[in-house]
Image (cartoon, rainbow, N blue to C red):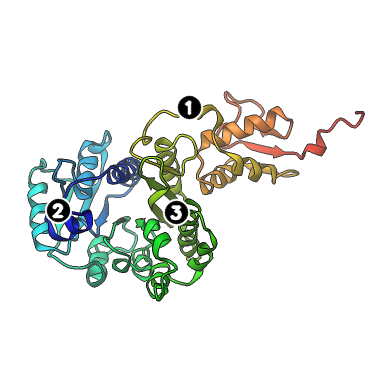
Amino acid sequence: MRRVEELRERTIWKSDPHTQVKHLVYRHYLQCWMGKILQKFPEATIVDAFAGPGVYTDGPPGSPVVVARTFLDHTAYQRFGRLNLLCLEERPDRVEELRRQFAKLPPSPQLNISVQPPGTFAERQPQLSALAHCGRAETPVLWLIDPFSLKSAPFSLIRQCLAGPRDEVLFTLFTNELHRFCQREHFDKTMTPYFGGDHWQSATAERRAGARKEAFATAYQQGLQSQGLFTGSFGVKISNQSARYHLILATHNEAGLKCWAPVTWKLDGYSGQGASADTADAPSLFDEALVVDRLDVALRAHAGTAQRWETLSSQAARLNHMDKHLRQVLDKLAAQGLAFRVDPVRARTAWPEGCTVRFYAPEDVADESS
């Protein structure tokens, strides 16, 4: 039986490698998100909008159970506030299986699991949002949106999931399907609602599969950024092929990027942009030569100015880099005479949080006698 038929006909189906990479991303991001949110707020919600049956035939847990186990096994669990886990699944047989899987977990007064009656995301999004926010718009809500088809999650629905000031979305973008079908006649009627505009068309100019998929991911992020959101992207690959799909993060708060960057670099130690089941979590041979070219260029552009650490750290996060990468590039620039810490004068480390860095251009340090 082909996989598409298996997904359509069976209650439970077999897992695959890229699903395991996706769940690794979930687990790593949830570790950080839970640690920050649930120790700051008394209550927060995670919505799994396409929950599935909660298990695969070969044994691995589905995404709703991954969320619950991450919460229960978290090292800071005892200090957590309450987590509401809302799950929506369209098929009744899968809803019943999901309930059976949750029944196997140990009970916790801090974890409120609510498996909703069968329904579609398009029909139930307003209701899910009301339940998730618990009557308070400021309640943090993380939406996991992993649909079965392009039409199941148009951009308009994603935007609705981000209506609250502390809403975040982790969305599966079907870049492989977008690449394969984007130039079919009348497919624009699916693409434009999916992207929330026709800006996706710029990606079709790319001919190579990998480049086109990356261009679609970039275009989707641009649509989110036009709404004033911070975004991140990670390509989920099969072996050494181009990405099967991309996971897109959308958040109102730059702190979300501070959680996202370590996830992507942990799973892809060379570029922080994508991983396969072969490479996820594997040690990288390139750890001493990380791909930080964009950050290097961005910092050099500060020549002639002094910048606070907070500004530099924010800029690094927007470029999907961590503070350790920022310090590595600053070390490199300092060795060339292009970056100096001007405050504080004394510090235990070269680039402590809160410091001020002054930048210079290469011509400022050129030896005029040569």
SS category of the residue bearing label 3: loop
Left or right, 357 with respect to 304, comes to left
Quadrant of the drawing holding the C terminus:
top right
Indicate the position of residue 267 as horizontal and vertical percent values: 39, 37
The Cα atoms of the two marked residues, 2 and 3, are separated by 32 Å
Residue that protrudes farthest toward the right in the picture: 369
The first of marks 1 and 2 along the sequence is 2
Say which mark, if any, is on residue 271. Answer: none
Left or right, 176 with respect to 347, comes to left
Name the one closer to the observer, 77 or 243.
Answer: 243
From the image, tell me which residue sits under label 3. Answer: 253
The first of marks 3 and 1 along the sequence is 3
Q: Are marks 3 and 1 in contact (CB under 8 Å)?
A: no
SS category of the residue bearing label 2: loop
From the image, tell me which residue sits under label 2. Answer: 53
Q: Is residue 147 visible?
A: yes
Question: Residue at point 38% right, 30% down?
Answer: 282
The Cα atoms of the two marked residues, 3 and 1, are separated by 33 Å
Say which mark, if any, is on residue 285. Answer: 1
Callout 1, which amino acid?
Leu
Q: Is residue 256 visible?
A: no
Callout 3, which amino acid?
Asn
